[in-house]
């Protein structure tokens, strides 16, 4: 509440925000986490969380996030179930206005609000999430070793991930809305993808339906053509949900917050961590690492004041 001046407010209780809250609270900072839904973020929705060291072959994401939350709360981090709606900065005081008409004040702010994958209104998609539909090649590519996959919609991010998929899948179909030679695709990435014998391009088409019984068996294209496949990846670059902060901190051309290596944004008392940040690899481990670094930087920033 507004009568408390927090040392740190964190927007977002995913792996980045939870890790930051643990480090900050342990470091003696009065810390509030504002989370609009369940704590745990995207990671809490992943049944088989891969690539998190120490858990083989995978871990229940919800369980891991619950443990992170309990750890942070045990060390004194405070949680509020609200949607942060506006950020107002006045000298060294930051005010966060929430959807419930509550507002909170703090000396520093960490934005850890993540990045929601865009939903594609394609028939059959929601039915097969976790049964052949994926939004992350780095996360799920290994499940398709020796199989056929479709990458639906091609931009530069999807091209990079398709090259990764081509290392393990037997066949990768790239379905591109664009004309062959489209100038918005990186020429070098296109060249690399064209040189792979197991990548097949389908230009100027898009997927209109995912078909199958209890798992993905194929896709229908807008010209009626059907392709058999074991999986469909939607991995076009996401626009960060940047409305909250875009006018306050510097962002890159996709709306992700630009930070230095200490997670400091272009505003000295505002920091960013996790998927919301401009960076190469968006995973639970990198989100958690960002959160730890951010909390340490914030503690040092406050000490210098
Ligand atoms: C389908 C899928 C599968 C994945 N599989 C893996 C995997 O196997 N292994 C792996 O390492 N990574 C995986 N990832 C990536 C991983 O989930 C993310 O990199 C990680 O969750 C990012 O953590 P974060 O804390 O930055 O953001 P998030 O987890 O997105 O958390 C952000 C939090 O901020 C909250 N929030 C947003 N805006 C507001 C607001 N205005 N007010 C209050 N709260 C707000 C959200 O509700 C959310 O809880 C996967 C991602 C997806 C989508």
Image (tube, rainbow, N blue to C red):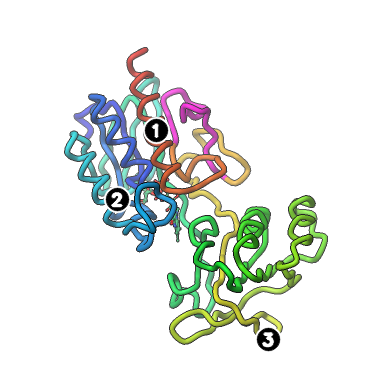
For the magenta stretch, what is the residue range?
255-272
Please rate how many residues cluster around mark 3, counting C-alpha atoms within 10 Å: few if below 14, some from 14 to 19, many from 20. few
Q: Is residue 51 magenta?
A: no
Q: Quadrant of the N terminus?
A: top left
Query: Residue at left 41%, top 25%?
Result: 269
Please state the horizontal and vertical placement of residue 147, each as a whole percent of the image: 58, 73
Residue corresponding to mark 1: 88
Please name whichever residue, 177 or 199, is drawn nearer the observer in this view of the structure: 199
Please state the horizontal and vertical placement of residue 172, each as a whole percent of the image: 66, 69
Query: Residue at left 37%, top 33%?
Result: 292
Labels 1, 3: front one: 3
Farthest residue in the top direction? Answer: 304
Please state the horizontal and vertical placement of residue 202, each as a whole percent of the image: 74, 72
Q: From the viewer's perspective, is 125 left or right of 182?
A: left
Residue corresponding to mark 2: 65
In the structure shown, which secondary structural element does the residue marked by tag 3 occupy? loop
Q: From the viewer's perspective, is 67 left or right of 228?
A: left
Please name whichever residue, 56 or 165, is drawn nearer the observer in this view of the structure: 56
In the structure shown, which secondary structural element does the residue marked by tag 2 occupy? helix
Q: Are marks 1 and 2 in contact (CB under 8 Å)?
A: no
Q: Residues under labels 1 and 3: Cα distance?
A: 52 Å
Comes first in the chain, label 3 or label 2: 2
Residue corresponding to mark 3: 224
249 above or below 44?
Answer: above
Query: Residue at left 21%, top 38%?
Result: 78
């Amino acid at each position: 509440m507004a009568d408390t001046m927090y040392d740190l407010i964190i927007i977002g209780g995913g792996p980045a925000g939870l890790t930051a809250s643990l480090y900050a609270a342990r470091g003696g900072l009065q810390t509030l986490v504002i989370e609009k839904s369940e704590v745990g973020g995207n990671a809490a929705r992943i049944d088989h969380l891969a690539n998190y060291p120490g858990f083989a072959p995978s871990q229940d994401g919800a369980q891991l996030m619950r443990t992170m939350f309990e750890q942070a709360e045990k060390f004194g981090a405070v949680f509020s179930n609200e949607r942060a709606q506006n950020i107002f900065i006045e000298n060294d005081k930051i005010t966060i206005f929430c959807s419930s008409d509550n507002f909170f004040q703090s000396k520093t702010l960490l934005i850890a609000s993540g990045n929601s994958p865009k939903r594609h209104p394609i028939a059959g998609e929601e039915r097969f999430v976790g049964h052949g539909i994926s939004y992350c090649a780095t996360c799920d590519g290994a499940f398709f070793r020796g199989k056929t996959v479709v990458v639906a919609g091609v931009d530069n991010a999807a091209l990079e991930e398709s090259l990764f998929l081509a290392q393990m899948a037997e066949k990768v179909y790239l379905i591109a809305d664009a004309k062959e030679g489209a100038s918005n695709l990186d020429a070098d990435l296109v060249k690399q993808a064209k040189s792979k014998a197991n990548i097949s391009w389908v230009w100027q088409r898009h997927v209109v339906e995912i078909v199958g019984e209890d798992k993905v068996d194929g896709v229908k294209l807008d010209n009626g053509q059907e392709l058999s496949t074991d999986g469909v990846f939607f991995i076009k670059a996401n626009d960060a949900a940047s409305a909250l902060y875009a006018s306050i901190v510097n962002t890159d051309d996709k709306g992700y917050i630009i930070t230095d290596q200490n997670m400091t944004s272009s505003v000295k008392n505002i920091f960013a961590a996790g998927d919301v940040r401009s960076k190469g690899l968006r995973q639970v481990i990198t989100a958690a690492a960002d959160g730890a670094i951010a909390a340490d930087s914030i503690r040092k920033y406050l000490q210098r004041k």
